[in-house]
Image (tube, coloured by chain):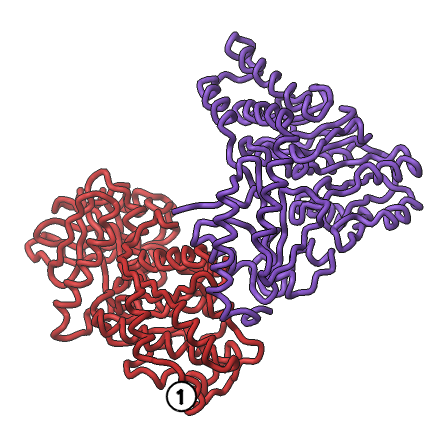
Chain colours: A purple, B red
C-alpha cells in the first residue's frame, strides 16, 4: 500500500544518519558514570552529543540538562523553578500551550498558585496587550511556547521578552520550544530567555530524549533525585542511545535548517494548491511555520476523516484530538474562537524534511476521494 | 501442601434426570479445556457421578483453582489428599490439611465410610480422628454446629480422601448444554455482561460486532476483541465482525434522522439473526435494558424486535445500571468497557431520536431500502474467528 505520513508534529521518523548513529552505539553498553575505560568512552559520546545540541541552540553544553523528553523538560522548568524561587508573584502562560505545560499549571493552581492564561487572537498568537496588563502586578514566571503544536503559529517571543524585561526585568521566562526546534532558530541567549524545553523525536531523533536549557543552574531544583547525573538536576543513568541520536539529529537540523525550510515551504504550497476548491478552511496562520497546516472540513468530523484516510495509508492527526467524548473541543480551537463545526472538522497535517512531494500528492488525492466517499454524512452525526 | 486430586461438585447438573450423563460429559469436557492452557497432563475422571481431576505432582494448585473458577456448572471444588487405608496415614493427612490455610480455632471431622471392610465405621472415624487432632494441636476445640473448618474424610476402596478447603465455583450450567446464541456485542458495559449471563445458563456464544469504519476507530474494534477475549476465558466463542458501513450509509441517505437509530438496530437484529441461523444458534442475546436511555422504551424494543422471529434474550433487561456495573467489575470487563472509544451507536445518535417509534413508522422509513440486499451485503462483509480463553489477551 502507498503511504503518506503527515503526522510529523506528533513524531518524526528517525533520519538515516540518526539510525546509523544509534545502531553504531548499540554495542556501547557501559554506564557513562563508570570509572573504567568503556564508561569513559560512553561519557565522551554523551558529551559530544551535548555539544551538538548546545550548538544548535547557541548555548554552552553545561547549560543543558538531558531529560526523558519535552514533557519532563517542561515539568522540570516550571516546577523546578518554583521549588527554588522565593520571589512572589503570579504565573503567566497562554491558553494554547501544550498539555505538558497547561496541566502543570492547573495542578499548581489547585495548590494555591495564581495563574493567568493569556488569550490568543484568531491567528493563534498571544495577545501582547493582555501580557502588558498582567505585568502591572508582580509576576514570577512567564511560560510561552515558541511554536504552537496544533496550528504552527509562531509566538512573538522576542516582543514578549522585551515587554517583560522592560517592566519586570527579574521575571523568569520559560519557552517550550519543542515544536520550534529545527524549524525556526531557537537561540535562548539572543532571545534573552532563561529556560527552554526541547525534544529529540520532533527532529528525527528517538523518542524518550529531550533537554532543558537553563541559563543558570541555580534557577532550578531537581524533580528526580538519585545518583546526581546532569549536575544533580536530573538523576538517573543517561539514556545514552537516545542522547547520541539527539546529538546527531541536532547536527543535521543545524546544517539543514534553511534547506529544510525551503523544501517544506514548497510542500505546504503544493498541499494548499491541492486543497483548492474543496469544502475546507485553512486554520493555520500564513506566517506560521510551514511544517504544520491545520485545516477544517466543516460538516465532517475530523476523526472520521482521519480513519478514512488511515485506511488509505494517509496518516494525519485531529490536532490535540477531541478526546472522543462528545462536546469536547480542542483547547486551541476554543482559544482561537473557532465555532464548533469548524473545530470538529479540524485535521492537522504536518510535514518534515523527510516528507516527499509524492507523499503530499498522494495525500491530496486521497483527501479528495474521502470527501467524495463520505459526502453523504456531511453535516450529520456531528454535535 | 501438595494435593493428589481435585474433587468437583455440581448442583443443578445433578437434577437433570436422564440428561445427567450428557451434562456431566459436557462439564468434564469444559473442565479439560479450562485446564489445557496450564500445559500439564490432568486426567479428568467421572466415577460415581462426581468429577475428579488427578493433579500432577509438580502442579500449581492455585492456577488450577483459578481455571476452575471460570467453568460454569461447578458449584464448588476442593483439593484432596489421597492416603493409604490406615488410620495413621489418614490422621497424618488430616493434621496437614487442618493447617493448610492457618490453624482454625474450632473444627469437626466429617467421615464417610463407603468401604465397609475398613475397621472403623463413620462415627468411630469421627471420634478417633477428632481425638488425634485435639491432641496434636493444644487450644483447638471441636464445634459440631458451627465449626470454622470441616475436615472431610472419605474411605473408599481405592484409598482414603481427606479435604477441608472448599472453593466456590461459578455456578450455572456447563456452557454448550443449552445450545448456541448470537450475542450482539458492542464496546459498552451491558452487552458483555449479558453475554456472560447467557453463558452462565449454558449457552455458547456467537458474538456479533457491527463495525463501521471510518466512523469508528480501529481501537473500538480492538476494544471489542478484548472484551470478547475476556468472555472467552469462561468458554470459547466465535466473534463475527460485520462491516456495517454500507448499511449505515444507506440508512443515513434514506431514513429520516429521528428514526436512524431504530432502523439501524432493526438491521443489526436482522443481520444477527441471519448469522445465528447460519451458525445454528437459536436465540439472539442483547444487552438491552428498559429505560436506561431514552430510546430503550418498550415501544422501541417492540419495533426493533418485530423484524426477527428468533427469541431475543435480554439477561440484563431489568437490572439497574449499578447492578450491571457490579457484574462487569466482577467478570473483568468493566475497565475495558469504559475505555473511551465510541461505537457507532454513540456516534450516530441524532439530536432528537424518536423515543417511541411504531412498527408502521419504521416500516415506512425503510421504504426506500432494499432490506434483503443490505442484509446479504452485511453478511458478505463479515469476518469470523474463534476465540479461546487465554489470559494473554489481557
Q: Looking at the image, which is closer to me, B85 or B372?
A: B372
Q: Looking at the image, which is closer to me, A39 or A211?
A: A211
Residue drawn 16% across the image and 64% down it:
B24
Q: What quarter of the picture does the C terminus of chain A occupy?
A: bottom right
Residue B239, horizontal then vertical, whole percent: 31, 61
Residue B74, horizontal then vertical, whole percent: 26, 62
Would residue B116 be visible to someone looking at this image?
yes
The residue labelled by disc 1 is B363
Q: Looking at the image, which is closer to me, B335 or A306?
A: A306
Q: Chain of mark 1?
A: B
Secondary structure of the residue carrying numbered label 1 = helix
| Residue found at the very far bottom of the displayed protein | B360
From the viewer's perspective, is residue B26 above or below residue A245? below
Q: Looking at the image, which is closer to me, B236 or A277?
A: A277
Residue drawn 50% across the image and 16% down it:
A30
Q: Residues within 10 Å of mark 1 (few under 14, many from 20)?
A: few
From the viewer's perspective, is residue A134 above or below residue A70? below
Direction from residue A83 to residue A152 in the image, left or right: left
Residue drawn 82% across the image and 33% down it:
A85
Rendering quarter of residue A235: top right
Amino acid at each position: 500500500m502507498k503511504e503518506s505520513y503527515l503526522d510529523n508534529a506528533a513524531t518524526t521518523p528517525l533520519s538515516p544518519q540518526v539510525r546509523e548513529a544509534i545502531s553504531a552505539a548499540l554495542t556501547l553498553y557501559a554506564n557513562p558514570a563508570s570509572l573504567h575505560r568503556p564508561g569513559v568512552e560512553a561519557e565522551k559520546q554523551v558529551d559530544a552529543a551535548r555539544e551538538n545540541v548546545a550548538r544548535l541552540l547557541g548555548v554552552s553544553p553545561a547549560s543543558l540538562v538531558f531529560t526523558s523528553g519535552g514533557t519532563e523538560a517542561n515539568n522540570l522548568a516550571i516546577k523546578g523553578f518554583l521549588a527554588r524561587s522565593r520571589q512572589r508573584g503570579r504565573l503567566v502562560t497562554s491558553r494554547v500551550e501544550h498539555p505538558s505545560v497547561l496541566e502543570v499549571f492547573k495542578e499548581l493552581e489547585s495548590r494555591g498558585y495564581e495563574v493567568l492564561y493569556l488569550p490568543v487572537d484568531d491567528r493563534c498568537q498571544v495577545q501582547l496587550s493582555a501580557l502588558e496588563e498582567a505585568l502591572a502586578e508582580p509576576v514570577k514566571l512567564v511560560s510561552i511556547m515558541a511554536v504552537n503544536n496544533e496550528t504552527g503559529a509562531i509566538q512573538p517571543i522576542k516582543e514578549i521578552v522585551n515587554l517583560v524585561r522592560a517592566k519586570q526585568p527579574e521575571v523568569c521566562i520559560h519557552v517550550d520550544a519543542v515544536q520550534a526546534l529545527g524549524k525556526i532558530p531557537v537561540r535562548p541567549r539572543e532571545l534573552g530567555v532563561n529556560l527552554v524545553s526541547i525534544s529529540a523525536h520532533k527532529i528525527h531523533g528517538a523518542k524518550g530524549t529531550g533537554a532543558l536549557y537553563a541559563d543558570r543552574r541555580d534557577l532550578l531544583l531537581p524533580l528526580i533525585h538519585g545518583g546526581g547525573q546532569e549536575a544533580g538536576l536530573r538523576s538517573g543513568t543517561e539514556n545514552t542511545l537516545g542522547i547520541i541520536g539527539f546529538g546527531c539529529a541536532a547536527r543535521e537540523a543545524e546544517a539543514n535548517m534553511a534547506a529544510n525550510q525551503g523544501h517544506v515551504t514548497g510542500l505546504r504550497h503544493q498541499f494548499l494548491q491541492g486543497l483548492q476548491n474543496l469544502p475546507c478552511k485553512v486554520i493555520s496562520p500564513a506566517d506560521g511555520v510551514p511544517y504544520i497546516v491545520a485545516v477544517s472540513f466543516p460538516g465532517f468530523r475530523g476523526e472520521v476523516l482521519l480513519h478514512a484516510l488511515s485506511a488509505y495509508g494517509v496518516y494525519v492527526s485531529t490536532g490535540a484530538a477531541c478526546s472522543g467524548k462528545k462536546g469536547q473541543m480542542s483547547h486551541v480551537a476554543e482559544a482561537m474562537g473557532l465555532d464548533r463545526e469548524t473545530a470538529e472538522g479540524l485535521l492537522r497535517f504536518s510535514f518534515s524534511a523527510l516528507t516527499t512531494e509524492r507523499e503530499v500528492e498522494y495525500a491530496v488525492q486521497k483527501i479528495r476521494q474521502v470527501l467524495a466517499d463520505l459526502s453523504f454524512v456531511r453535516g450529520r452525526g456531528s454535535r | 501442601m501438595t494435593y493428589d486430586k481435585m474433587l468437583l461438585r455440581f448442583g443443578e447438573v445433578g437434577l437433570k434426570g436422564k440428561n445427567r450423563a450428557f451434562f456431566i460429559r459436557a462439564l468434564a469436557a469444559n473442565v479439560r479445556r479450562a485446564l489445557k492452557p496450564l500445559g500439564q497432563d490432568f486426567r479428568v475422571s467421572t466415577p460415581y457421578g462426581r468429577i475428579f481431576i488427578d493433579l500432577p505432582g509438580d502442579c500449581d494448585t492455585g492456577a488450577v483453582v483459578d481455571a476452575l473458577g471460570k467453568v460454569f456448572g461447578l458449584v464448588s471444588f476442593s483439593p484432596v489428599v489421597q492416603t493409604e487405608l490406615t488410620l495413621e496415614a489418614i490422621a497424618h493427612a488430616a493434621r496437614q490439611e487442618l493447617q493448610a490455610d492457618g490453624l482454625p480455632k474450632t473444627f469437626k471431622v466429617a467421615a464417610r465410610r463407603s468401604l465397609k471392610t475398613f475397621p472403623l465405621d463413620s462415627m468411630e472415624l469421627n471420634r478417633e480422628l477428632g481425638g488425634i487432632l485435639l491432641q496434636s494441636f493444644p487450644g483447638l476445640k471441636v464445634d459440631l454446629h458451627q465449626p470454622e473448618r470441616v475436615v472431610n474424610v472419605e474411605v473408599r476402596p481405592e484409598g482414603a480422601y481427606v479435604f477441608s478447603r472448599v472453593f466456590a465455583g461459578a455456578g450455572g450450567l456447563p456452557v454448550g448444554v443449552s445450545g448456541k446464541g448470537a450475542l450482539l456485542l458492542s464496546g459498552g458495559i451491558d452487552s458483555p455482561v449479558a453475554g456472560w449471563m447467557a453463558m452462565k445458563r449454558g449457552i455458547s456464544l456467537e458474538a456479533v460486532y457491527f463495525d463501521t469504519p471510518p466512523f469508528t476507530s480501529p481501537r473500538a474494534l480492538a476494544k471489542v476483541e478484548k472484551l470478547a477475549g475476556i468472555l472467552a476465558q469462561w468458554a470459547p466463542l466465535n466473534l463475527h465482525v460485520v462491516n456495517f458501513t454500507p448499511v449505515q450509509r444507506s440508512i443515513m441517505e434514506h431514513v429520516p434522522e429521528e428514526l436512524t437509530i431504530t432502523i439501524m438496530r432493526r438491521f443489526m437484529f436482522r443481520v444477527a439473526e441471519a448469522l445465528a441461523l447460519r451458525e445454528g444458534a437459536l436465540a439472539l442475546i442483547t444487552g438491552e435494558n428498559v429505560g436506561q436511555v431514552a430510546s430503550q422504551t418498550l415501544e422501541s424494543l417492540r419495533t426493533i424486535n418485530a423484524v426477527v422471529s428468533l427469541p431475543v434474550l435480554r439477561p440484563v433487561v431489568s437490572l439497574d445500571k449499578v447492578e450491571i456495573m457490579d457484574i462487569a467489575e466482577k467478570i473483568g470487563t468493566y475497565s475495558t468497557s469504559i475505555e473511551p472509544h465510541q461505537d457507532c451507536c454513540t456516534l450516530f445518535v441524532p439530536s432528537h431520536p424518536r423515543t417511541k417509534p411504531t412498527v408502521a413508522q419504521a416500516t415506512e422509513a425503510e421504504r426506500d431500502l432494499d432490506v434483503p440486499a443490505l442484509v446479504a451485503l452485511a453478511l458478505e462483509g463479515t469476518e469470523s474467528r474463534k476465540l479461546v480463553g487465554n489470559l494473554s489477551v489481557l
